Amino acid sequence: MEEELETHGTEPVNAEETVLSPPELSSPQEETLHNNADEANVGFSASCLTTAELQQHWRAVKQEFRSVKLLFDIPSARIREQTMSKYVLIPVPQVYQIVVIRSGSYDCERVTIERRYSDFLHLHQELLLDFSEEMEDIVMPRKKMTGNFSEENIAERRVALRDYLTQLYSLRFVRKSQAFLAFFTHQELKDAYNLLRGGRFSRALEGLQKVLVLQEKLSHNPTLLIPTLCAILVCQRDLEDFDAAFQTGRRALPTVRRYELRQYQGPLLEALVDLGYSLELPVAQLQDELTRVRDSPYGQVSQVSLKELVVQEFV
């Protein structure tokens, strides 16, 4: 067990993205070098594998490099009404429901977020600040001044905004930008952390798990998932779901180690050790690692608890 602990509507339009894909290969020699690096990364040695095992390994490696597409769909929109007096309802801008779907296989984790037209406009303005030249062919759907709430106009707007997201995602520099990811996750993260700080852990956990799905689909930087995973762990632990919290921590720890995220390493190890004791699991190696982290020159960074670290987000 100790070794295991230490193991390091209309049809939507799609835009292609390669997940876990290597850099573009210009020659067989470069491909060989890349494959050799992958083999080393996953801990395989060709000399210790039979021919059948080696073939099975390379099939698995190639499967990891399969082309994956994300589909954006806006299946519906609704008009929210704001009560200005006892008898008067004032319509406010439409709220569009957005679904991000991973294609290529059945996506059982389809989450829905809601955004207003002003949120799309804010995203467009943010992207133009950094990518004005590259986005010269990307047109933001305009808002009509009359008939804005008719069913026909709402349907047209849904299609236009869906196509707009697809065009943005087709641009590599845009889909990797913080502004693009924040469009899909910032509001939900802010709400979830507010709930967490208020002690409403069940609702906070629901929102954080929803955000995690979106981050996994949209982001290719594993470090961006660590704050969310740590917040999920805190909620699960406070809800006394210790086994789920321990599994969440184990999922986060390899990335924290690999990228030397020192502010999370000590608090996360401490949480895992405490959870391991509660679950009567062997945690001697984790305890040793925690001691080394605390004795290191960066040990002072790790003295806060994981919960203290988490609640500082979005303050």
Image (cartoon, rainbow, N blue to C red):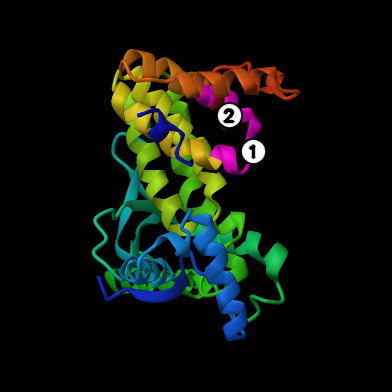
Up/down of 293 relative to 221, above or below? above
Tell me: 171 left or right of 7.
Answer: right
Q: In the picture, residue 290 is in which quadrant? A: top right
Distance Cα–Cα, label 2 vs label 1 = 8 Å
Name the outermost residue toward the right. Answer: 297
Residue at the spot 58% in from the left edge and 30% down from the top edge: 264
Query: Is label 2 in a helix, a strand or a loop?
Result: helix
The amino acid pointed to by label 1 is Glu
Visible in this render: residue 118? Answer: no
Q: Nearer the viewer, residue 266 or 133?
A: 266
**What residue is shown with label 2?**
265
For the C terminus, the quadrant is top right
* Location of residue 98 in the rendering, given as x and y in whole percent from the top left corner: 36, 59
Residue at the spot 30% in from the left edge and 34% down from the top edge: 86
Q: Which region is colored magenta?
A: 256-269
* Location of residue 240 in the rendering, given as x and y in whole percent from the top left corner: 30, 18
Name the outermost residue toward the bottom. Answer: 27
* Location of residue 46 in the rendering, given as x and y in whole percent from the top left corner: 46, 64
Residue at the spot 31% in from the left edge and 29% down from the top edge: 244
* Location of residue 289 in the rendering, given as x and y in whole percent from the top left corner: 56, 24
Tell me: 110 left or right of 266.
Answer: left
Q: In the picture, residue 133 is in which quadrant? A: bottom right
Q: Which mark is residue 260?
A: 1
Dominant secondary structure (helix, strand or loop) of the stretch shown in magenta: helix
Q: Are marks 2 and 1 in contact (CB under 8 Å)?
A: yes
Tell me: 129 left or right of 45.
Answer: right
Tell me: 286 left or right of 279.
Answer: right
Asked if residue 258 is among those painted magenta in the image, a careful observer would answer: yes
